[in-house]
């Protein structure tokens, strides 16, 4: 499994935790963590030569 896929799994896990969080601050924290994992996945894709830096920025903007 690629490292970027592992990062995306972590992001998905954070989103699941955000949905089950008992407080709004905790939910927002998990959501921010998921965004961080997704950003790391995009960076790893770039490092692995799977995308250009510009396409990574476009993908990041479309996920927000």
Image (cartoon, rainbow, N blue to C red):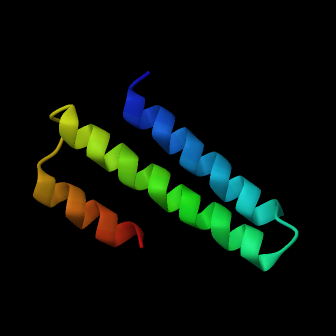
Residue 41 is drawn in which quadrant?
top left
Residue 44 figure quarter: top left
Furthest toward the right, the residue is 22
Is 11 above or below relative to 24? above
Q: Residue at x 84, y 74 (%)?
A: 23
Judge from the rendering whether residue 43 lies leftward or rightward of residue 5; answer left or right.
Answer: left
- Is 24 on the left-hand or right-hand side of 11? right
- In which quadrant of the rendered image does the N terminus lie? top left
Q: Position of residue 32 (x, y in %)?
A: 55, 65
Q: Is residue 23 above or below residue 40?
A: below
Query: Disc count in the image?
Result: 0
Relative horizontal placement of residue 63, taking residue 31 as reference (left or right): left
Q: Residue 50's x, y, as percent? A: 19, 37
Query: Residue furthest toward the bottom?
Result: 24
Where is residue 42 drawn, in percent x and y?
31, 48
Residue in view at x 39 percent, y 36 percent = 4
Which quadrant of the rendered structure holds the C terminus?
bottom left
Which residue appears at 12% of the width and 59% of the height? 54
Rendered location of residue 24, percent (x, y): 77, 78
Q: Residue at x 21, y 31 (%)?
A: 48
Instruction: Judge from the rendering whether residue 6 lies leftward or rightward of residue 44; answer left or right.
Output: right
Looking at this view, is 29 or 10 the one in front? 29
């Amino acid at each position: 499994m690629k490292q970027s896929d592992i990062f995306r799994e972590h992001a998905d896990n954070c989103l699941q935790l955000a949905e089950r969080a008992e407080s709004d601050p905790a939910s927002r924290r998990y959501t921010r963590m998921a965004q961080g994992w997704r950003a790391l996945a995009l960076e790893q894709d770039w490092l692995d030569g799977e995308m250009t830096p510009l396409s990574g920025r476009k993908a990041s903007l479309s996920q927000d």
